C-alpha cells in the first residue's frame, strides 16, 4: 500500500511524464532528481530495496564468474604445484620415499607428503586405477608405475600418504641419458599421469592431467660400484679363494650395498672378464665369471665361481706387500655388458679402478698365482710336445688364432708366446674359445641327457622371452653353462621361430603356411622338436638345394603342431602354381655374403614380392650388415620400401654355443645371433 501523502503520486507523475519518457531508461532506472523522496525502477523501489537488490546481483555475478575460475584454473594449478612439490628433489634427497614390498613382482610403497589444500574440512579421494608414465629428458618412455589402491587424505591439514604401487619397465632410457648417468648418477624422469579426484564425495575432476620431474638417483655410479665389488673393506668384506668346482677354480665373495630404492636387479651379462694387474697397467691375470647379479634396493651378499686365467706373476711391489702382511694395491679393468631392470643398458662398457685388498685377500690371490704358474709351466711342456700327441682334435681344430699357423687340435695356440698374447690382448676371445673344450666335455653329461629326454616329450605351451624362461617352463633343472649352451644350439631354430610368430602375423587359430628358404640344419631336426611351437599350428615347407630328398614322410595327425614337407629346390625354381605362404623364414642365409649374394638374388626378390613378412637371422654383426645392404638393394630394384615390423637386433634365442670359421678364427659366430622381421611395401 503506497503512502497517501501525495508524494508517490507526484513521483509517479514525473517519472511517467512525456519528458521522462524522452530521457529513456536512465530516468526510469535511477528516477528523477526533482522529487523529494526519490524512487527507482519506474518508481517501484525506494533507495534501500534498490541498493539491496544490486548487492545481491553483484554477489551472484561474482560467484558465477569467480567459482568457475577457481575450480577450472586455480585449484587444478594448485594440485599441479602440489604434485611437482611432492616429487621434487632437494639436494640428494627426495620428499618421496620408497620401500620395496615384493621384489620379484616389482611392488613397492612410496610415501609422499600432501600439503593442505583448504581451510575447510573434508576428504580428497584420488580414484584408481591410474598409471604414472615415466619418460626421460628426450621424451622416450621406458617404464610406468601402476596404482590400484584408492588414495584419501584430509583437505585442511598436511599429511604423509603411503601408496602401494607396481613398477613395470618395458624399455631403456635414451642412450644419451645413459651416457650422462654414468657421471651424474641421476636420471631426470618426467612423470605423467591423469587423476580422477573426488572432493566431499563428488567428482570434481575427471582424468586431470599432471606432470612433474622426478630424479631417480643412484647412490653410487657404476664405476664406483664396480670398484667396490673387488675392494676389501668392512662394508664389502670381499675375499677370493681358490676352489675346485669343475672348470672353475676361483671364488669371489663380496657384499654389494644398495644403489637405488627402486625394486630391480643389476646383471653383468656373462662372460664377465675382469683383468687384474699392477697400478702401472701391467696385466697379471683374467678372472672370468659366468654371471654376477645383485639387487638395486637391498644389500646383496654374492658368491660367484670363476676361472683364474694366468698371464704372469705379480710384480715385486705386490709380492713384497703380501709378505710383510700389509694391504696391497692392484688395478682392475673390464668391459661389461650390463642389464638393469631386465634390459641391456650398456654394452661393453669400459670400467677400471685401482683397488686396495687386505692382507688376507692379497695372500689368497698370491697363492692362486703360484698355483696357476705351476699349471702354466706344465701346460707349456704339453704344448712343446703337441706334435707327438695322439689325441683326436675335437674342439680346437682350426689354425692358431694369433698367427694362423697350423697346430694340433687339442691345443688352443701353437706356442707359449701365442697363448700369452691371446690371454693378454684378446681376453674375450680366449674365454669364448675355451668354451669349445667345455662344450665337448659336456656332451655326455648325464644332466644334459636327462634334459634332452625331458624336452623330447614336453610342449612349451607358455610364451617365454629367454632361455632361462624356456628351461623353467619345461621344468628342466640344468645349471651348467656348457649344458645350457648345448641346449640352446639344439633348440635355437624352433624357439627363434616361436618367439617371432606374432611379428610374422601368425595366430593360434589357423594353420598357417611357413616357407623356410635355404633350409640346412633345420631341415634335419627331429619332428618332436617342432612340437614346442604349440599352441600354434603350422605347415612348414623346407625349401633349398641342401634340403634332403625324403621319399616317404612320417604320418601326420591333424592334432600335430607342425606338418613338415620338403622341396629340394631353390625358391625361385618352384612351380609358378606354388601357393604363396603366410610367412617366410630365412635362418642365417648370408644374403649379402660375397660368395652367396648372386645365388640368393632371384629367390630374395621373389620372396619380397609376396609382400609377406620375412624372418631373417644372422650369424654376426658383420653378417647382419651385409644382409641389410642386400635387402636395401633388392627393395630399390623392386621399387618398394622395407617395413621392419621387428627391427634388427640381438635374438634372445640365439645359440649360445660359438662356431669358429677356420678361415677367420678371431671372429667366432653364433647361430641366429641377430634377427629381424621385414616385409616389402609398394
Image (cartoon, rainbow, N blue to C red):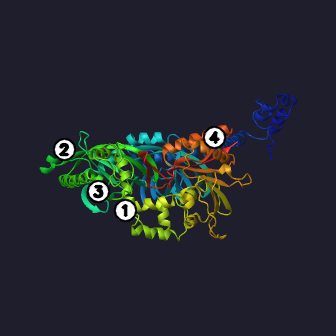
Q: Where is residue 300 in the image (x, y as percent from the top left)?
A: 34, 58
How packed mark 1 is, by other alpha carbons closer than 10 Å (few <14, some 14-19, many 20 or more), is some
Which numbered disc flags the more N-terminal residue, 4 or 2?
A: 2
- Dot in front, 2 or 3: 2
Query: Residue at point 73% right, 51% down?
Result: 576
State left or right for residue 11 relative to residue 542. right
The local secondary structure at tag 4 comes to: helix
Q: Which mark is residue 252?
A: 3
Q: Which numbered circle lies on residue 441?
A: 1
Above or below for 560 versus 9 = below
Image location of residue 63, percent across then percent down = 65, 44
Mark 4 or 1, closer to the camera = 1
Figure quadrant of residue 534:
bottom right
Q: In this view, does 60 lie to the left or right of 115?
A: right
Mark 2 or mark 3, which has the lower sequence index? 3
Q: Nearest the camera: 66 or 658?
A: 658
Q: Residue 127 is drawn in which quadrant?
A: bottom right
Nearer the observer, 181 or 590: 590
Against 457, residue 634 (above or below) is: above
For marks 4 and 2, give the CA distance: 59 Å
Counting residues from the N terminus, which is met first, the one under dot 2 or under dot 1? 2
Q: Name the residue under label 2.
A: 315
Q: Residue 634: give its label.
A: 4
Marks 2/1 in contact by CB < 8 Å: the verdict is no
Q: Distance between the residues labelled 2 and 3?
A: 22 Å
In which quadrant will I find the C terminus?
top right
Amino acid at each position: 500500500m503506497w503512502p497517501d501523502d501525495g508524494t508517490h503520486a507526484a513521483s509517479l507523475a514525473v517519472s511517467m511524464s512525456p519528458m521522462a519518457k524522452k530521457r529513456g531508461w536512465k530516468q526510469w532506472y535511477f528516477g528523477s532528481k526533482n522529487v523529494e523522496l526519490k524512487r527507482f525502477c519506474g518508481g517501484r523501489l525506494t533507495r534501500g530495496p534498490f541498493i539491496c537488490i544490486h548487492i545481491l546481483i553483484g554477489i551472484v555475478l561474482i560467484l558465477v564468474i569467480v567459482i568457475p575460475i577457481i575450480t577450472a584454473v586455480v585449484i587444478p594449478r594448485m594440485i599441479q604445484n602440489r604434485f611437482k612439490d611432492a616429487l621434487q628433489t632437494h639436494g640428494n634427497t627426495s620428499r618421496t620415499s620408497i620401500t620395496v614390498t615384493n621384489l620379484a613382482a616389482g611392488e613397492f610403497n612410496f610415501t609422499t607428503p600432501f600439503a593442505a589444500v583448504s581451510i575447510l574440512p573434508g576428504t580428497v579421494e584420488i580414484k584408481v586405477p591410474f598409471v604414472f608414465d615415466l619418460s626421460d629428458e628426450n621424451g622416450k618412455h621406458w617404464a610406468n608405475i601402476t596404482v590400484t589402491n584408492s588414495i584419501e587424505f584430509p583437505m585442511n591439514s598436511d599429511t604423509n600418504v603411503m601408496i602401494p604401487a607396481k613398477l613395470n619397465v618395458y624399455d631403456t632410457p635414451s642412450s644419451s641419458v645413459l651416457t650422462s648417468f654414468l657421471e651424474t648418477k641421476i636420471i631426470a624422469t618426467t612423470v605423467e599421469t591423469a587423476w580422477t579426484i573426488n572432493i566431499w564425495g563428488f567428482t570434481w575432476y575427471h582424468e586431470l592431467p599432471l606432470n612433474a620431474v622426478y630424479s631417480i638417483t643412484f647412490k653410487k655410479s657404476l664405476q664406483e660400484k664396480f670398484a667396490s665389488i673387488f675392494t676389501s673393506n668392512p662394508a664389502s668384506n670381499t675375499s677370493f679363494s681358490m676352489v675346485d668346482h669343475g672348470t672353475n677354480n676361483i671364488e669371489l665373495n663380496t657384499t654389494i650395498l644398495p644403489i637405488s630404492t627402486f625394486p630391480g636387479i643389476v646383471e653383468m651379462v656373462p662372460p664377465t672378464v675382469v683383468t687384474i694387474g699392477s697400478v702401472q697397467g701391467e696385466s697379471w691375470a683374467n678372472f672370468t665369471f659366468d654371471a654376477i647379479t645383485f639387487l638395486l634396493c637391498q644389500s646383496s651378499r654374492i658368491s660367484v665361481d670363476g676361472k683364474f686365467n694366468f698371464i704372469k706373476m705379480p710384480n715385486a711391489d705386490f709380492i713384497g706387500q703380501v709378505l710383510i702382511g700389509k694391504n696391497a694395491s692392484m688395478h682392475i679393468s673390464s668391459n661389461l655388458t650390463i642389464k638393469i631392470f631386465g634390459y641391456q643398458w650398456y654394452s661393453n662398457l669400459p670400467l677400471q679402478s685401482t683397488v686396495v685388498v687386505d692382507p688376507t685377500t692379497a695372500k689368497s690371490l698370491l697363492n692362486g698365482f703360484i698355483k696357476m704358474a705351476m699349471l702354466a709351466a706344465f701346460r707349456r711342456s704339453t704344448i712343446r710336445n703337441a706334435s707327438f700327441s695322439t689325441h683326436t682334435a675335437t674342439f680346437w681344430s682350426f689354425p692358431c688364432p694369433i698367427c694362423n699357423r697350423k697346430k694340433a687340435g687339442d691345443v688352443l695356440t701353437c706356442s707359449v708366446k701365442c697363448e700369452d698374447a691371446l690371454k693378454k690382448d684378446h681376453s674375450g676371445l680366449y674365454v669364448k674359445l675355451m668354451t669349445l673344450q667345455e662344450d665337448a666335455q659336456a656332451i655326455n653329461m648325464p644332466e644334459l641327457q636327462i634334459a634332452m629326454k625331458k624336452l623330447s616329450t614336453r610342449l612349451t605351451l607358455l610364451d617365454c622371452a629367454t632361455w632361462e624362461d624356456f628351461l623353467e617352463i619345461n621344468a628342466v633343472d640344468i645349471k651348467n653353462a656348457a649344458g645350457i649352451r648345448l641346449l640352446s644350439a639344439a633348440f635355437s631354430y624352433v624357439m627363434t621361430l616361436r618367439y617371432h610368430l606374432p611379428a610374422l602375423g601368425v595366430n593360434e587359430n589357423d594353420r598357417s603356411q611357413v616357407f623356410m628358404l635355404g633350409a640346412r640344419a633345420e631341415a634335419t631336426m627331429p619332428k618332436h622338436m617342432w612340437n614346442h611351437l604349440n599352441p600354434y599350428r603350422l605347415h612348414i615347407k623346407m625349401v633349398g638345394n641342401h634340403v634332403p630328398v625324403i621319399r616317404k614322410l612320417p604320418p601326420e595327425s591333424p592334432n600335430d603342431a607342425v606338418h613338415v614337407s620338403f622341396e629340394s629346390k631353390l625358391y625361385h625354381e618352384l612351380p609358378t602354381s606354388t601357393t604363396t605362404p603366410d610367412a617366410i623364414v630365412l635362418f642365417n642365409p648370408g644374403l649379402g655374403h660375397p660368395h652367396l649374394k648372386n645365388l640368393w638374388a632371384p629367390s630374395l626378390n621373389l620372396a619380397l614380392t609376396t609382400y609377406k613378412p620375412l624372418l631373417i637371422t644372422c650369424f654376426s654383426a658383420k653378417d647382419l650388415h651385409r644382409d641389410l645392404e642386400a635387402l636395401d638393394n633388392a627393395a630399390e630394384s623392386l621399387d618398394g620400401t622395407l617395413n621392419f615390423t621387428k627391427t634388427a637386433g640381438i635374438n634372445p634365442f640365439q645359440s649360445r654355443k660359438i662356431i669358429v670359421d677356420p678361415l677367420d678364427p678371431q671372429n667366432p659366430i653364433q647361430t641366429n645371433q641377430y634377427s629381424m622381421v621385414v616385409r616389402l611395401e609398394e
